[in-house]
Image (cartoon, rainbow, N blue to C red):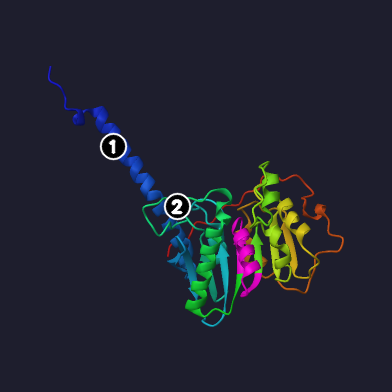
Amino acid sequence: MKKTPLFRSPTVKLCLATLALLTACATSRPLLKTEIAKRIASPAWMIGREIPAGDYLLTVYERIHEYNSTVDVYIEGNGPTPEYPTALHLATKDKAPNVIYIAQPCQFSGLIKDDQECTLTGEEAYSPASLEAVNAALNEISRRYKVHGFHLIGYDGGGVIAANLAATRKDILSLRTVAGIMDTDAYNDAHAMPRTRNPNNPALKAKDLASIPQMHFIGGQDMEVPPSVLHGYFQSLPPTRCVRYEMIQENQHEDGWVEKWPELLKRPANCNGALPQDFNALDLVPQEEPQPYTIVREKPEKP
């Protein structure tokens, strides 16, 4: 009986073909996410590049029309490279002349040394190395475009990064967050996880942030970053006239923000207001149980 060579066996061929397909998919998926990000940014005339920052290469998309001016900077939320980069979508709705989106370390780009895998999980996104990388990116942007000051907008865990930068830098003009994790302990409590005593918890920086104009947006339907997380931060603030918030009852963690952002961005972040004197935790608790709420996302326009 004539034997079929192993590599010619139909079963082996099928296995090899399947393995090749899986390998191709694993390789192409990050490239697909990068291509999607380019298609999101292109209609807003935002051009992508990479900034060497510490051990990382940070992906940014930017539109700069004016040197020697201010810049609106959007910082992405936590996790691996997002399929739906909410902060980038928000940035494309910003009509300011100078707008820059910064992905977190390990999103879209990796480490400068390609021989190491780039992964940040959980609160590693707020590690000193991660914060310093974004800080270094702001320094590079400031030198390149002669920036007079930054308006920071942080989405999700990007709010933690933005808050830490605002607490330490002297060129931050305002701080805005969208579904921002402004108290990492309260966030862990909401998800029944142990507290980590993270020194970069924004609630621990509340005194340093109290004089910076702030506007915080939270979603009444947000199960990922519920309103109690923002309340934890507010409880740490000293008396201040610089902090405002607005709860959008129908918004979830991702859904609803992009469509409303042009109007929400008009809400002032200044020191002409104050939290109500009778501010209570109930002010940040939805009066109704969250209900399913969905929005059909727009497909990115072709460049």
- Give the percent coordinates (x, y) of residue 79: 53, 51
Question: Based on the displayed image, in which of its 4 quarters is residue 276 positioned?
Answer: bottom right
Disc 1, SS:
helix
Q: Assess disc 1: are there few (<14), some (14-19) or many (≥20) residues with their C-alpha within 10 Å of its C-alpha.
A: few
- List the residue tagged with mark 1: 17
> In this image, 101 relative to 217: left or right?
left
| Farthest residue, direction top | 1
Quarter of the image that includes the N terminus? top left
The answer to whether residue 136 of the structure is visible from this angle is yes
Q: Residue at x 49, y 72 (%)?
A: 140
State whether residue 93 appears in this view. no
Can you say which quadrant of the picture contains the C terminus? Answer: bottom left
What residue is pinned by disc 2?
Answer: 118
User: x%, y% of residue 128?
Assistant: 56, 59
Question: In the rendering, which numbered label is found on residue 201?
Answer: none
Is 286 left, or right, of 197 in this rendering?
right
Q: Is residue 3 left or right of residue 274?
A: left
Say which of 23 and 167 sits in front.
167
Q: Name the residue at 61% across, 66% down.
A: 165
Q: Residue at x 80, y 65 (%)?
A: 275
The span picked out in magenta is: 152-174
Q: How far apart in space, not on screen, are marks 2 and 1 (Cα)?
A: 29 Å
> Is disc 2 surrounded by few (<14), some (14 to 19) or many (20+) residues within 10 Å?
some
Tell me the amino acid under the disc marked 2. Cys
| Kind of residue at disc 1 | Ala
| Secondary element at tag 2 | loop
Q: Is residue 42 above or below residue 126?
A: below
Q: Position of residue 233 (x, y in %)?
A: 73, 57
- Position of residue 172 relative to residue 164, above or below, is below
Nearest to the observer: residue 236 or residue 97: 236
Any magenta on residue 217?
Answer: no
